[in-house]
Amino acid sequence: MKKILIIAVIVTLAGALYFFSVAEQEAPAESAWTETAVSAEALAEIANYEYTQEYSDSKGRFSFRYPAQFIVSAVPGESGEAILVQNYDTGIGVQILTTPSGKDADITAGMIREDIPGIRIEDVQVVEIGSNRKGVAFLSNNPEFGGRSRDVWFMYKKELYQITTYANQDAFLKGLFGTWKFFR
């Protein structure tokens, strides 16, 4: 498990670096990807989003729905894939990292703390994945997200999933994750 989480952290950091480099290249200059750059109006509007578009994973593992004003990009990596769901006009977005794990296990906050000693984990919530798997949602001190992120980590069908956004965009993550479906 320790090796899997170390690899996942490396993939997370690589994905986050890509996430920010894409935002800098493609987003308008006034739309910086920092937690403070998102306006209160944009955050309040999350409650009104309609999740009308569907993204289906290219490997047929899962799908989720997202608002029409967002762009979804899948970026393959050496050990996994980063899926970015983002709106450049508002600065709201979610990063989904998938990494083969080779096993299935329920992930707990204790396991993450053991494998990543410097991580701060707060506001821990158990997340039900399907009918027989559990993961964990938590607030963290992720430096790639301005030092405060909302994360959901779980394993399912031998894949490790790490879903991350800025802490103040938790409502968007919950809305998107609420539409999540597995195919296999």
Image (cartoon, grey):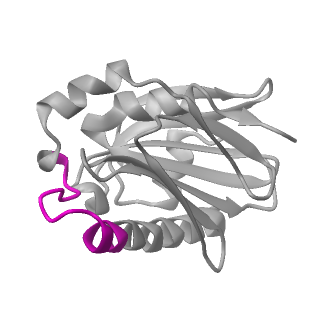
Residue under the point 57% across and 25% down: 178
Farthest residue, direction top: 48
The quadrant in which the C terminus is found is top right
In this view, which residue lies farthest toward the bottom? 78
Give, as a single range, the part of the protein colored magenta: 21-35
Quadrant that contains the N terminus: bottom right
Position of 70 relative to 15 (above/below): above
Residue nearer the viewer, 30 or 128: 30
The answer to which image quadrant residue 169 occupies is top left
Q: Position of residue 181 (x, y in %)?
A: 72, 33
From the viewer's perspective, is residue 40 above or below residue 33? above
Judged from this view, the residue extending furthest toward the right is 184
- Residue depicted at 32% across the width and 48% down the height: 120
Left-right relation of 182 to 7: right
Membership of 30 in magenta stretch: yes
Residue furthest to the front in view is 68
Residue 40: percent from the left, percent from the top?
13, 31
Question: Residue 84 location in percent, x, y?
Answer: 48, 56
Question: Who's the residue at 28% across and 52% down the image?
Answer: 141
**96 displayed left or right of 89:** right
